[in-house]
Amino acid sequence: MKKVFVSGCYDLLHSGHVEFFRQAAQYGDLYVGIGSDETILHYKGHRTLYDENERLFMVKAIRYVKDAYINAGSGIMDFIPTVDIVKPDILVVNEDGDHEEKRQFCKERGIEYVVLQRVPSEGLEAHSSTALKDKLCQIPTRLDLAGTWIDQPYVSQYAPGWAITISLEPTFEIRERCGLSTSTRNMIKKIWPVRLPNMDPEFLAKMMFCFENDPERSDGIISGAQDSIGICMPGLVRHYYDKRYWPLKIESCKDEEVLQWLENHLVMIPMEPRKPGCSVVEGKDINETKVKALAKAADDCWDAILKKDLQAFAKAYKDSFNAQVAMFPGMIHPSLECRVESLESVEKVESIQDIIDKWSAVPGVLAWKMPGAGGGGYLACVVTDAQSFAKKHPEAIRLTIRRL
């Protein structure tokens, strides 16, 4: 009987892995190499959900597997020491794992190289570990309600002010480049792939802010603190900035009546994601008058929310967005830097202003803004009643504010 070898992480073991083992075992006795915790952390940039001993136990328990080992190597070729132990006749990979370096290695060792297609077992759906992690991931996101941009010192240098955020449960698909702080969320997932740790939320927020803004970061961009605060701190939060990246003070509201009231008056409408290469800061025009208008709108917004005054909330919400756009017109009219194939293709795309004009005229919509830096993503609207609005408009996303 020939010896067959496969290698992988097998962190979230699923039916696709078992089917892969079944198909590989048709070539002979199957031996499995499993990526170590250390290798996965350095190669893939995140911790495993299950440690290497648990993964080894589960893989060994599968009836198609003759034996399994923890790979002692590193990187994409971490299985070489295990191959030296097993001395297989055949190395099997799936189409995602096909790599020229593996082919060359097998050629040099006289090992047959087989590539299998990803085919689920009959009657089952196709799975991937990445997709399953996305389904299991409970990392929240955030929606900024008012004061956006004040967390950048080049804005708050003109006047201090508050930014207001709510932490959202991931009850909907959180798309990339859509203004919901996915870059910060992805940084968190590198350390905690599924959920936030049980620790002081403000300390966690500052830790993640520092982690994301590595001083060696080559692009020179400092991500705003509202992203990490909005994700890590539950409930409704406001944070005060004055010429600094981290706020001077933070205040939270976890009053259940206030949070329920917000949930009943906020929805998000999906738009196209912000295009690669677009700039929302090009053409910015920041001065004291505009920043003071932004700060005042945030003050008014907070007061209106605590009073549960819908008309005042809608006015302040709209005032805040108008103040943002006055400083950063690219939020609605982003520039494109040589990433669009032709002007003709751009003209066929519904513009952000078109979408705002369309939804602002819909009955029940009182105010609107785009999350984050804008340029696309979502239109976050204040509505008279979120439940009835979502029934009439199925594309509207209702929001759940994180309590804990």
Image: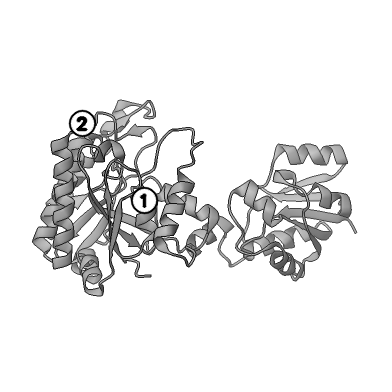
Quarter where residue 229 is shown: bottom left
Mark 1: which secondary structure? helix
Q: Report crowding for label 2: few under 14, some 14 to 19, many 20 or more residues within 10 A (C-alpha).
A: few
Q: Is residue 87 visible?
A: no
- Whole-percent x, y for residue 313 in the image: 14, 59
Q: On residue 365, which mark appears? A: none
Q: Is residue 112 above or below residue 221?
A: below
Q: Is residue 82 left or right of residue 268?
A: right
Name the residue type under label 2. Answer: Asp
Residue, far right? 1
Q: Is residue 146 above or below residue 213?
A: below
Residue at x 66%, y 60% (from the top left corner): 10
Q: Is residue 240 above or below residue 216?
A: below
- Whole-percent x, y for residue 1 in the image: 90, 59
Residue, far left? 311
Q: Are marks 1 and 2 in contact (CB under 8 Å)?
A: no
The residue wearing badge 1 is 227
Name the residue type under label 1. Answer: Asp
- Sequence-first tag of 1 and 2: 1
Q: Report crowding for label 1: few under 14, some 14 to 19, many 20 or more residues within 10 A (C-alpha).
A: many
Quarter where residue 352 is shown: top left
Q: Is residue 176 left or right of residue 119?
A: left
The residue wearing badge 2 is 285
Residue at x 69%, y 44% (from the top left corner): 98
Residue at x 14%, y 64% (from the top left corner): 384
Q: Is residue 325 left or right of residue 77?
A: left
Query: 173 or 285: nearer the eye?
Result: 285
- Whole-percent x, y for residue 72 in the image: 78, 52
